[in-house]
Every structure is written in structure tokens, then in C-alpha cells.
């Protein structure tokens, strides 16, 4: 495949993550590995310093009695101590068990119980309190280690130790046995389980997907053959390190490429930090990119007439170029069911630039794009990688119009990797790009996507004997996603197999595609299509409070709460118009006939969303049963009006 470039940094050594850390420290000891903002000042940690922290914490865990193969729960915000702890648990031969920082006490109870962890690492007092509550209830927690000991108070010294306390224990063992740590590092093997990562739990309790060392190590090397990253690159870590996407990038790709991992001061400062850092590689979920776009729209709406005119002109220039360069799957040949398509079959569709395109785009870049990209934090960005959830074609093309090199990537918890991506210049509308080196894709007769490659998945915790239900004997992982696979290696995701709606008329409909079209609106934050066993489709809508609020203020319309906003006739008409725009692109059976605006924000705490803001469909249907029933009643009940119809049923 002549059009693919091979990255010289992709040949990093080490067959496990701990060995990669060791070799980075040996080869680039004084070079920066980590940067973290503390009290407004960016502080650097070298690769040697990184390894030293891992050394001491590993040995401290050994002193505390941690055994090989034992799980250790980590619940914290992203920080350098998480990386040290994560690698130290691996070096000790134990298993990292990830817990989202926002997980409730009951969710923590379930994960610790399912994994069998007796050691818990907590980020701060909030996470410590959850562990202490469980321990007081008789849960078998033997040691709690806290990064930030403020608030630990009387608990310190016995059950609870600070991170530095553990490092001090490790320093004592290191002085007594200076070769112990190196022996531990090289005792870790590629087939050892290195983490238990819990799925989002959209349709029930989360499952603990176990992964062996070889998965992320080989997967990162595969990705780096086409994603050129090295020690000169910087990455901002802010998505939870309990999430597959962040673990791939901040651990596996970071160790394999040698790039610098940056940690924000807090989750609240991320937007300011990305502007300050201007990272060369940035990762995001679609919701974050939607919010960045909305903030630009709001800002431009308050700008001078000249600036608004320049923005509209420049965006028009970009959109026209995107339209001329837009590539679709219309001329692609679908692969036959059970036909394996690998990287050797990939034929990228390259973007063609005319001299006129380049000249006009250069002017627009000088006048508008560079200022916008600096405001977004993307001025020096070579890749913006979007993963974890489907991204609408409209949002993708907005960033392309601004010259942002965006990548739409596919992955899942069980993969612990990114097997396909839309590389800049080779993107195709409506796809998640093509399979990457080392990977093969295949679709079943019913359209399910199967993948084979450097998959480290070895079963679910507590269900180890059922691994063949998702990863068959030939190594194909059954993703549960419906797809269209083409013989040139490109993949289009249609939706989740379990989410397919079957209307009363017998039509099979994937709600995800419809929802993405609706969420392309800047005024709509979330959409959930209803219609299983119904004779028409309806939709629950969550408003984007900032965007709708800015619109109402510009029109001089007062509101106090989101409930007031949701009931406002102007807002109802606005949402109706946005849904009508989406309906125009859908087949008649797929159109939304009625909708209801949810009068509050959806949240993880209320059980409607996962920690990564994926909708829990079953819980949503329970929570908003009255709103749903009203959309299918001729006479809606009092207090539960349907804010429609968006189109006559």
C-alpha cells in the first residue's frame, strides 16, 4: 500500500507496558515524560523520574502484601499519580481494576466485589469516603491508599496510607534489595492480565473486561504505523483513565511513542489548559467537540458585524472545499459476508486539492481559521482523535472546514485498542475509516462487525469460561455493532445490534443513525429515538442549555430554569424545525413524528447516562415513561405534554 506512511517511532521495544517504561527511562532518561499543572505552574517529570516513582510505589505495594494476580481498584481523577500507580500495580504482577471517578458507592461496591480487589487506591477525600463506607459495612478492604491525604485525618496510618507513605515503604525495600524492582519488571509477561476495565453498562450492570499485556502493546505499535507520533508530541489527558480510549492513548500510545502526557490542574480547567498547551495530539468524545463548536457559535454571535461576516465567509470557503472533496461510499463495493478484509486490501481514497482551493484556504486561514483554532486549542494540532461514541458527519465536516485534522476512530472496551480510523486526507463520509495495520474486519450474514488482530481480551471477570461467546475460536471478536464493510477496508457503523427497533409494521430501524442526525443541531445535546413495537417513531430531546439560552437572550426572552426553557413555545418551535431538518434526510419510515423535551439535564447520578454520557435506554424509558406515553396518546396526560408533533403522524 504505497500511500501509507510508516512512522519511524513505531518500532519501540518492550513486550509489556512495564518494559516499555523501563526502556524509555534507559534511552531518554532526562527527556520530559509527564507534565502536570499545579497551582498554575506546569511541572515536568522526566522518564527517569517517572520510573523512579513507579519503582518505589511497586516495592511499597510488595511490602504491604500485594500478591501477583491480585486486583487493585483505582478511583481517581486523572493525574500523574494514577500513571505511577497503574504501572506499579502491573510491575508487581497484579491487575489494575478501573473505577470511574464519578461512580457511586454502590457502583464501587459492585466493581470491587466482582473483581475481588482488597486494595483500593483513592484520589481524594470523596473517593476515600466511598471506600471507608464500604469497609465499615463489612466489605473486605484491607488497604486504602490515597493520593491527596487532606481529609484522611484519623484514618491515616493503619487502614489508610498516603501515596507518599507507600513510596517511603518502597524506598526502604529498595535500599535492602536494589535489584528487586528490575526482576519484577521483567517477570511480567505478554500473556499476563494487566487490567480489568468495566464496560459502560448501557443495558445492565457493567462487565469487567480483562486484557493481557500484549493487547495494548501490539495495538499501539499497529496504530503508530499510520499515526505519526514521537517524543516531540504532546497529549492532554483529561478523559477518565478508567475509559478504554484514554487508557489506549495515555498509557499504551504514550509508552510506545514516547510522547509527553499532560495533566490538567482539574477537570474544570481543561478548556483553558488545552488553549494554553496547544497539544499536537488531542482526544475527544463527540460531545466535547459539539460544546467547543457551540462556544464558537455563541462567541461569534456576540462579535462585531465585520467579524461575523468574516466567519461566515471563511466557514463557507471551508464548507465548499469539503463539499467538493467529499467522498462517499456510493461507489464502494460491499464485502461479502464472512469475507475477511485486512490492511493489505486497504485502498485509501485521497483528498484532492486544486490550486484555487489551496490559495483561498490560505487566505481564510490567515484571516480566520488560525485565530479560531488558537481559541479552540488546535492551532498546532496534527491530529484530533474522536472516539468512544458515534460522531455525526456534519460535526466532522465542520472541523474539516476549519482545517482541523480530525480522525473519527472506532473502538470498544473489549478491544482495548483502535482497529480502524479515518486518517486525515483519507476520510470518507459516514465511515469510521479503514482497518489499521495488523487488523482484519469481517461482517456476518446479519451485518455484525467482527474484528481480528492484537486483541488482548481474555474474558469477563467472573465469567472467564464464557469468553467464546464474544471472541470465537478463530480469534474473531464479535463487536455487537452492525456495519457495512467494503472490500477496500472502509467500515461504516450502522448501529448497535441490541438497539435495533422493530416497529409494529415490521421495519428494522437503527436508532443511532437517526439520533446522530438530530444531535448535529447545536441546540440539541442528546436525543433518544423511541419506536420498538410502535407504529411510528418519536424522540426524547435534551437541550443544549448554553446554546438555547444564548438564543433566548438574544431575542429578549426571559427564563429561569431548564424546565421553563423546555416549555417555552419558541424553544418548542426551534426543536421542531431542527428535527424537520433531520427528517428531510431520512426515509419516511425513519422520520420522527413527535418529540418531547426533557425538562432537566440527564445525568449519571440519576442513572440515565453512563459515566461517558452514553444513554441507558432501558432506564430512560422508565424515567420518562409519562413523556413517552404522551407522544403515543391522542390526549396526553396532564403534566406530561408531548412537545410536538415535529411532523404529523
Image (spheres, rainbow, N blue to C red):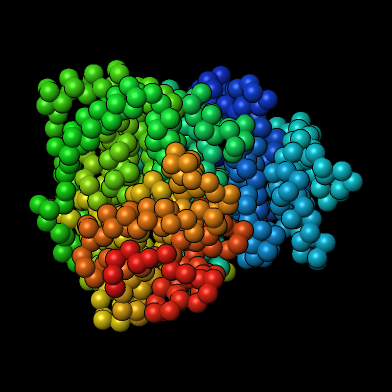
Task: Tell me residue 513's x, y (percent).
Answer: 30, 59
Percent x, y of residue 431: 25, 50
Give the residue at x 19% y 62%.
Answer: 339
Question: As displayed, is residue 200 above or below residue 265?
Answer: below
Residue at image x 73%, y 43%?
124
Residue furthest out toward the right = 154
In percent of width and height, residue 598 lies at 49, 61
Q: What residue is at 28 percent from the left and 47 percent from the top?
A: 393
x and y percentages locating residue 450 in the rendered image? 30, 62
The residue under the point 82% across, 42% down is 151
Judged left or right of residue 356, residue 70 is right
Q: Quarter-wise, where is residue 406 in the image?
A: top left
Residue 369: tell me if it is visible.
no
Q: From what the image shows, is residue 617 above or below residue 186?
A: below
Q: Does residue 109 appear left or right of residue 415 in this picture? A: right
Residue furthest out toward the front? 556
Residue sitting nearer the eye, 443 or 302: 302
Image quadrant holding the C terminus, namely bottom left
435 to the left or right of 352 = right
- Side of 399 where 339 appears, left or right: left
Q: Nearer the viewer, residue 472 or 383?
A: 383
Q: Nearer the viewer, residue 440 or 356?
A: 356
Amino acid at each position: 500500500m504505497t500511500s501509507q506512511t510508516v512512522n519511524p517511532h513505531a518500532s519501540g521495544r518492550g513486550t509489556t507496558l512495564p518494559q516499555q517504561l523501563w526502556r524509555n527511562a534507559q534511552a531518554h532518561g532526562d527527556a520530559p515524560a509527564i507534565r502536570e499543572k499545579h497551582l498554575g505552574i506546569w511541572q515536568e517529570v522526566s522518564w527517569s523520574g517517572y520510573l523512579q516513582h513507579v519503582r518505589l510505589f511497586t516495592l511499597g505495594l510488595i511490602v504491604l502484601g500485594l500478591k501477583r494476580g491480585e486486583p487493585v481498584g483505582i478511583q481517581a481523577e486523572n493525574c500523574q499519580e494514577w500513571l505511577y500507580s497503574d504501572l506499579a500495580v502491573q510491575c508487581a504482577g497484579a491487575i489494575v481494576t478501573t473505577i470511574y471517578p464519578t461512580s457511586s458507592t454502590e457502583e464501587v461496591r459492585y466493581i470491587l466485589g466482582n473483581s475481588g480487589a482488597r486494595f483500593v487506591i483513592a484520589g481524594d477525600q470523596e473517593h476515600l469516603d466511598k471506600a471507608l463506607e464500604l469497609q465499615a459495612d463489612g466489605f473486605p478492604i484491607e488497604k486504602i491508599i490515597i493520593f491527596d491525604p487532606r481529609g484522611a485525618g484519623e484514618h491515616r496510618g493503619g487502614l489508610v496510607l498516603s501515596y507518599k507513605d507507600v513510596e517511603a515503604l518502597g524506598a526502604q525495600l529498595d535500599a535492602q534489595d536494589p535489584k528487586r524492582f528490575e526482576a519484577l519488571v521483567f517477570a511480567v509477561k505478554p500473556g499476563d492480565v494487566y487490567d480489568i476495565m468495566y464496560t459502560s453498562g448501557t443495558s445492565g450492570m457493567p462487565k469487567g473486561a480483562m486484557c493481557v499485556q500484549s493487547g495494548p502493546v501490539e495495538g499501539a505499535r499497529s496504530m503508530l504505523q499510520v499515526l505519526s507520533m514521537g517524543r516531540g508530541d504532546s497529549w492532554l489527558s483529561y478523559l477518565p483513565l478508567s475509559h478504554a480510549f484514554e487508557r489506549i492513548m495515555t498509557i499504551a500510545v504514550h509508552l510506545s511513542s514516547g510522547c509527553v502526557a499532560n495533566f490538567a490542574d482539574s477537570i474544570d480547567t481543561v478548556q483553558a489548559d488545552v488553549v494554553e498547551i496547544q497539544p499536537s495530539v488531542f482526544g475527544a468524545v463527540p460531545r466535547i467537540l459539539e460544546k467547543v463548536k457551540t462556544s464558537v457559535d455563541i462567541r461569534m454571535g456576540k462579535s462585531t458585524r465585520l467579524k461575523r461576516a468574516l466567519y461566515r465567509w471563511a466557514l463557507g470557503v471551508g464548507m465548499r472545499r469539503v463539499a467538493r472533496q467529499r467522498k462517499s461510499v456510493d461507489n464502494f463495493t460491499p464485502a461479502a459476508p464472512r469475507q475477511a478484509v485486512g490492511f493489505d486490501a486497504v485502498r485509501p481514497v485521497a483528498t484532492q486539492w486544486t490550486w484555487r482551493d489551496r490559495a483561498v484556504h490560505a487566505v481564510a486561514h490567515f484571516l480566520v481559521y488560525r485565530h479560531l483554532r488558537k481559541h479552540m486549542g488546535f492551532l498546532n494540532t496534527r491530529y484530533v482523535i474522536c472516539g468512544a461514541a458515534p460522531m455525526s458527519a456534519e460535526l466532522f465536516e465542520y472541523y474539516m472546514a476549519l482545517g482541523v485534522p480530525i480522525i473519527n476512530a472506532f473502538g470498544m472496551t473489549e478491544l482495548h485498542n483502535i482497529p480502524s480510523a479515518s486518517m486525515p486526507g483519507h476520510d470518507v463520509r459516514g465511515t469510521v475509516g479503514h482497518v489499521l495495520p495488523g487488523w482484519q474486519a469481517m461482517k456476518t450474514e446479519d451485518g455484525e462487525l467482527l474484528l481480528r488482530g492484537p486483541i488482548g481480551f481474555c474474558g469477563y471477570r467472573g465469567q472467564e469460561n464464557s469468553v467464546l461467546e464474544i471472541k470465537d475460536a478463530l480469534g474473531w471478536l464479535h463487536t455487537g455493532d452492525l456495519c457495512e464493510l467494503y472490500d477496500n477496508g472502509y467500515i461504516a457503523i450502522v448501529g448497535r445490534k441490541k438497539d435495533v427497533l422493530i416497529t409494529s409494521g415490521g421495519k428494522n430501524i437503527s436508532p443511532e443513525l437517526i439520533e446522530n442526525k438530530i444531535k448535529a443541531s447545536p441546540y440539541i445535546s442528546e436525543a433518544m429515538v423511541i419506536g420498538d413495537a410502535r407504529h411510528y417513531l418519536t424522540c426524547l430531546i435534551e437541550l443544549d442549555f448554553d446554546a438555547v439560552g444564548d438564543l433566548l437572550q438574544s431575542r429578549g426572552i426571559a427564563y429561569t430554569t431548564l424546565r421553563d426553557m423546555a416549555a417555552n413555545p419558541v424553544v418548542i418551535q426551534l426543536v421542531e424545525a431542527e428535527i424537520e431538518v433531520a427528517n428531510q434526510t431520512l426515509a419516511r419510515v425513519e422520520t420522527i413524528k413527535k418529540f418531547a423535551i426533557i425538562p432537566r439535564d440527564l445525568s449519571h447520578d440519576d442513572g440515565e447516562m453512563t459515566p461517558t454520557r452514553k444513554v441507558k435506554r432501558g432506564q430512560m424509558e422508565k424515567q420518562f415513561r409519562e413523556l413517552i406515553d404522551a407522544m403515543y396518546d391522542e390526549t396526553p396526560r396532564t403534566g406530561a405534554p408531548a412537545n410536538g408533533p415535529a411532523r404529523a403522524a
